[in-house]
Image (cartoon, grey):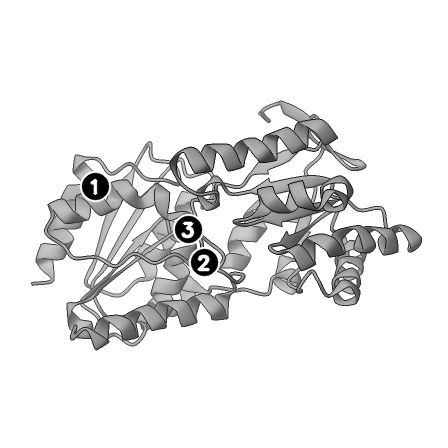
Amino acid sequence: MRKITHLVKIGNINIGGNNPVVVQSMTDTDTSDINKTVTQIEELYNAGSEIIRVTVNNAESAKAIKPIKNILEDKNINVPIVGDFHFIGHNLLKNIPDCAEALDKYRINPGNLGLGNRKDDNFKTFIDIAKDLDKPIRIGVNAGSLENRIHKINHFGDMEINFLIIAWRGFSGNKGKPSEKGLYIDANSAIKWLKKLGLNERDIILYGESLGTGVATEIAQSNNYAGLVLETPFTSMIQAAKNFYPYIPVSLLLKDKYDNQKKIKNINIPVLVMHGEVDQIVPFWMGKKIYEIANQPKYSHFTKYDDHMMEYDEKLLFALKKFVESLN
């Protein structure tokens, strides 16, 4: 039975309540390039997108929002535009009021707003502006911030494991926009940095969580590493999208593929797959399938009650420790 949620109005579109699911897409243009951004929005709109998100990561892109909306109105394209803000969004909304007024919704990631009191102050700026202009806000936690990984780092230290945890471009203070190719470059750069410190690839365990499983699986195909840990892995980005939008031609619309189920067959180093049965973001069957088609030696830690962010309890830590010990 469908859960009745709170109704939210985004421009001329209602979501939540008893309203049908709507399709949202995101541009991959430099938003400050007004003509390219308008063209892509028009293409997405004609393909069936009902809400469209654009990156607003600097003053130039913020100043472009109102002209973009004006051109769309002249073309009779009445589609809500969502601003995806990164690290200075609170300042952009405050200093460029045309942007704040023209956008139909704000999307923010609290992990990108700073730490401690500064984070609270910046977040309050967002809330105050949204309230004054009657704009909805999406809290896009998406498990993408380093802050959400502190508890894991502490446990790695307890197991006497040295670790390097990296934040992708576009997350946790890093500039740029995430893309499949870009994230592969970021991961390889981290590996090169470790090798410059004198580490051998055979001493490195790759660990990917959620979207990171796509990156870790890509890198692991060289089979030069000690092992691979996949937490809440998906089979492919296309299948993950189809799970939410079964009637949309996502294979044609998705630029990033992350074909884990194809790449896992090329990996011959030890693999540990961890997943919870009540994961609401990546279905459990995907993690189970990745485990089933993985080559030996392989290990699993499947739980009944974990959602997408798995709990680092004694059982999970035991599974991790046992896996690491098996590599020695």
Q: Tell which circle, 3 or 1, labels the residue nearer the N-terminal end.
A: 3
> x%, y% of residue 2?
60, 27
Q: Marks 1 and 2, how far apart in space?
A: 30 Å
Name which quarter of the figure residue 71 lies in.
bottom right
**Residue closest to the eye, 253 or 115:** 115
- Element type at marker 1? helix
Residue on which the image places disc 1: 316
Left or right of 78, for residue 146: left
> What residue is drawn where x is 38% and y is 53%?
233
> x%, y% of residue 44?
75, 57
Q: Amino acid at mark 2?
A: Asn
User: Can residue 152 be seen from the camera position used here?
Assistant: yes
> x%, y% of residue 150?
28, 43
Q: Give residue 174's mark.
A: 2
- Please report contact status of discs 1 and 2: CB closer than 8 Å, yes or no: no
Q: Nearer the viewer, mark 1 or mark 2?
A: 2
- Element type at marker 2? loop
Residue on which the image places disc 3: 286
Name which quarter of the figure residue 187 lies in.
bottom left
Left or right of 309, for residue 4: right
> x%, y% of residue 126?
60, 35
Left or right of 165, for residue 59: right
Q: Amino acid at mark 3?
A: Met
> What residue is drawn where x is 48% and y is 69%?
182
User: Can residue 249 be seen from the camera position used here?
Assistant: no
Q: Amino acid at mark 1?
A: Leu
